[in-house]
Amino acid sequence: MNTASVDEKILERFRRLWASGRMGHAYLLVGPKEAGKTETALAVAKLVNCESSATKPCTECPSCRKIESGNHPDVMILQEEEGSIKIDQIRFLLGRLQLKAFEAKTKVFIIRHVETMTLEAANSLLKTLEEPASHTLMILTTAVPEANLDTIRSRCHVVKFFPSSRRRLQEVLGKAQPMAQFLAVYSDGCLGQARQLAQEDFIRRKNQILDGFLHKSHEDFFKKSSSQKEEAVEALHIFLSIIRDAILLKTGVPADELMHTDRLADVRSLAGRSFEDLSAIYEQVVNTKELLDENLNAKMAFSILRQKIWDN
Ligand SMILES: [Zn+2]
């Protein structure tokens, strides 16, 4: 059963690109099966051809309806036949590319499972990606990020999709976006756990914990933490996740892909520290947790951690 659906967040990104005239000619959508890559590609095809003056795609105008039913003459989906995408298929596509659009503002070619292209097919596509035709949009998809697609990748804008499980989880949880994102990532895609955390008022607790670690005004936090093992382990786990966010942000991961999108000011402030500094904190968190796991006194470890966080 195909349960994939449009990734609204990614569609919104395309909407902004289109509205500001910054849409590229070729995109490579990378993400796991059923993450909604093809559905989103079709939504983008609707977007660039929609006739409505309201929010695009409207899904109701003749153009949107034709794309939805697979009957739009200028929107073409291509995928492997008998295991691979062959050069004849690409030639056919390139032929269509040369033709004037029947009715579209922008012709859209969607090539699914682009990793199955034969070498010949890939080579003949490359030239088109290099010298794009006007009013034409190519959207390629793959679920195999490690596939040998370097030459194609370098000629496309790459768009990453998350597993649908995490996205669905966010929808089901129905919380404000950053909260749902945090719960979905923290529970590692497990709906049961995420729901339980949502009920337990977990977000409030995790923010209290982060305040304790990051804001000096919560002076007694460290004292309390070091005396109660279970709570201390949870606190360290949560604190580790914001350190991880800071390191990811420093390495160029976009802010909206982080776990603590509701604490971006803190993540940014942490990311302002050096890598050495962050990894020292990280290690001290791990050390402290090990002491707790072995039921050893972690008071000293907590106080070292405190120094590492604040005395800089
Ligand atoms: Zn429309």
Image: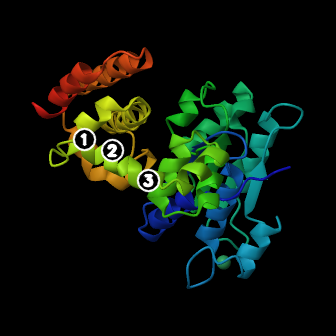
Q: Residues within 10 Å of mark 1 (few under 14, many from 20)?
A: some
Residue type, numbered disc 1: Phe
Residue at 39% from the left image edge and 47% from the top image edge: 206
Return the residue found at the far right. Answer: 82
Of the 4 image quadrants, the one containing the C terminus is top left
Residue at 44% from the left image edge and 19% from the top image edge: 293
Name the foreground residue: 56 vs 109.
56
Task: Using the rendered image of the protein, determine whether residue 5 is visible from the camera's viewpoint.
Answer: yes
Q: CA distance from mark 1 to mark 2?
A: 8 Å
Q: Secondary structure at mark 1?
A: helix
Residue highlighted by disc 2: 209
Q: What number is the disc on residue 221?
A: 1
Number of dots carrying numbers:
3
Q: What number is the disc on residue 203?
A: 3
Q: With respect to residue 237, does 294 lie above or below?
A: above
Q: Secondary structure at mark 2?
A: helix
Residue type, numbered disc 3: Ile
